[in-house]
Image (tube, rainbow, N blue to C red):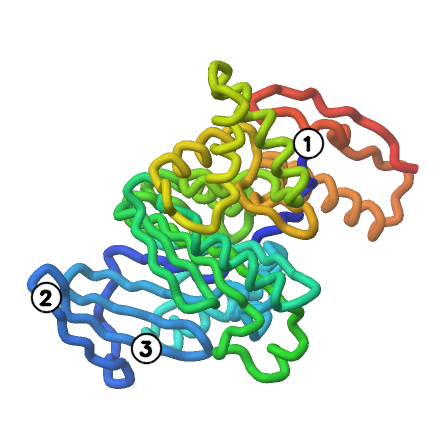
Amino acid sequence: MKSLVRPDVSIDTISLCWYNFDSGFDLSNWKYCPKKSEKQYDSFLYYKDSVTLIYIPAIHLLMASFSASKVANGSNALPYRFEQYNGVREKVEEIIRMAAGQQLKIADSFVSRLDVYKQFTFKTRAEAAQMISWMQKQPNQGKSVKTIYSDNGDYRRFKNGLVLKAYIKSDDPRLLKDEQERLKPTVRIEVECRKTARRKTLGKMVSAEGVLRYPASWVGLFNYTLDKFRLTGKVLTKNNFKKRTKEILKKEYPKSRPSTINKYLRILCSATDSDKKKKVELINKISKHGICPFCAPNEYVLSAKSTVSPQQQKTIELFRQCIATKRERNDNKCSILAYPLHFISIPSTKVIKPAIFDSS
């Protein structure tokens, strides 16, 4: 069953745009940034309280880029929750008012970039490092480009603006020392979406308010990216991985001899890229069956758990609001409109008649 609302992914960096922005304000406190190429524009930059504002006079564009989790919690090691939207909105809008002298609303802006992440905690740093090592050894998928950062991170991207990063968050030097000490050995898988990929996954003009308030878009983006890099599915223990993968390979290659199946299994389990082309083919085969090409001491799922659609979330919030209002009034004679709990597992395209009951 889908989660009522609570996702297991969070937003980190998000970039917002206001088009046709009026340039009539004092730029003396802004930093001038000359264009670096003929295809770019001169811009002005303003930074305050983890919020970066960028103004491009030539095209009347104002951008605000910030970590939602950091603005909401003071640290991007802590997840942003959709209930924190109003607090984040007030902080960002106040900084824009101070810097540009105008009252802009996040509700009127559009998303140009969105970073979503999921974190995995381990008992030891060695286990966290094992996960990063596996990702670094996994071959590229399709036309993606890959970069390895020592033993701490893995970075891969497509030219369309879809990026996936994996690194040990508890080793992040940007965290304060006490934050590093409190954080258990943690691997963060972070996806970044911009340019063509953002338009394809989120839409051409996606509302910033909708993205920040409704986690369904976070889950969809995260799982879409993992699927493009063949990282969806369940992580199994080594014995279970061999057993399950062998069954899948027999189905995918019904005419192959047992010795050939064993060879394919060795290629999948190998830490080298001696047969990279074949390994990519085998990873594509097992990923279709919900198996992640990685073994770990404990089993878990890399992809994000599903949550309700924005329409269903609005219904749930309205229902809760009605309950809260009724409790404040202490009116036992008033009946309220409510949807049955099983509604959350039914596709939003299906029309469900609400049930009326007396909460007293």
Question: For the residue labelled by badge 1, is the local secondary structure a helix, a strand or a loop?
Answer: helix
Crowd around label 3: few <14 · some 14–19 · many ≥20 (10 Å) = some
- The answer to which of marks 2 and 3 sits earlier in the sequence is 2
User: Disc 1 marks which amino acid?
Assistant: Ile
Crowd around label 2: few <14 · some 14–19 · many ≥20 (10 Å) = few
Quote the CA–CA distance across marks 3 and 1: 43 Å
- The answer to which of marks 2 and 1 sits earlier in the sequence is 2
Disc marking residue 154: none
Q: Which residue was labeled with disc 3?
A: 46
Q: In the drawing, does residue 177 fall left or right of residue 224?
A: right
Mark 2 or mark 3, which is nearer to you? Answer: 2
Asked whether residue 86 appears in the rendered view, the answer is no
Q: Which residue was labeled with disc 1?
A: 344
User: Disc 3 marks which amino acid?
Assistant: Tyr
- The answer to which of marks 3 and 1 sits earlier in the sequence is 3
Quote the CA–CA distance across marks 2 and 3: 21 Å
Residue 285 image position (x, y, % from top left): 47, 29
Relative to 67, say whether 330 is above or below.
Answer: above
Quarter of the figure with residue 106: bottom left
Relative to 257, say whether 136 is above or below.
Answer: below
Disc marking residue 37: 2
